[in-house]
Image: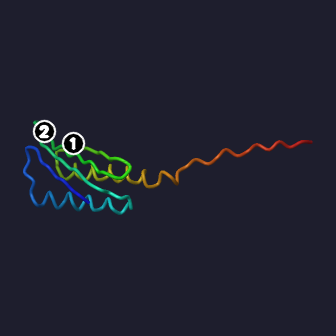
Amino acid sequence: MQMNITGKNIEITSAIRSYIESKFKKLEKWQVDITGCQASFSEQPNKQKKFEATVTIPKGQLVASAIHEDLYAAINEVEQKLERQLNKLRHKPDARRTEKPEIVEVEE
């Protein structure tokens, strides 16, 4: 899995990089072929941290973003959003609605 991590107005430390990588490794448990990850975070003027992530899969892309005062909380929130999207993608074929039962007329 190719992973790019960029920071705007924030220095990328090894602790932040390893934390983001560990969170994206958890996404592999959904058994969806993840071909690449693009993560970027920035500090906004009001001291809030914005974290955005784009995960590339064969069917398209999954995108999630979060704004929080704590960068680690924003990373956790984005990881949960991506997990929900992967869960939906993984189980969508199983969630087909049942067909309407045929009405059988009884003649007397």
Q: Residue 79 carries which label?
A: none
Mark 1 / mark 2, whichever is N-terminal:
2
Element class at badge 2? loop
Residue positioned 12% across, 42% down in the render: 43
Residue 95 position within the rendered picture, expressed as x and y whole percent measured from the top left:
52, 51
Element class at badge 1? strand
Numbered label tally:
2
Residue 71 position within the rendered picture, expressed as x and y whole percent measured from the top left:
17, 50
Q: In which quarter of the image is the C terminus?
A: top right
Q: What residue type is labelled 1?
A: Ile
Residue positioned 27% across, 49% down in the render: 78
The reply to whether dot 1 and dot 2 touch (C-beta < 8 Å) is: yes
Measured in 3D between alpha carbons, the distance from the residue under mark 1 to the one under mark 2, in whole angstroms, is 9 Å
User: Quick one: which residue is furthest to the right in this view?
Assistant: 108
Q: In which quarter of the image is the N terminus?
A: bottom left
Q: Which mark is residue 67?
A: 1
Image check: 42 left or right of 88?
left
Return the residue at label 2.
Answer: 44
Residue 26 position within the rendered picture, expressed as x and y whole percent measured from the top left:
30, 61
Question: Vertically, is 1 above or below 56?
Answer: below
Q: Residues within 10 Å of mark 2 (few under 14, many from 20)?
A: few
Q: Which amino acid does label 2 sit on?
A: Gln
Image check: 25 left or right of 86?
left
User: Quick one: which residue is furthest to the top in this view?
Assistant: 45
Residue positioned 58% across, 47% down in the render: 97
Viewer-closest of 36 and 46: 36
Image check: 76 left or right of 107?
left
Question: Vertically, is 108 above or below 22?
Answer: above
Residue 12 position within the rendered picture, expressed as x and y whole percent measured from the top left:
10, 53
Q: Residues within 10 Å of mark 1 (few under 14, many from 20)?
A: many
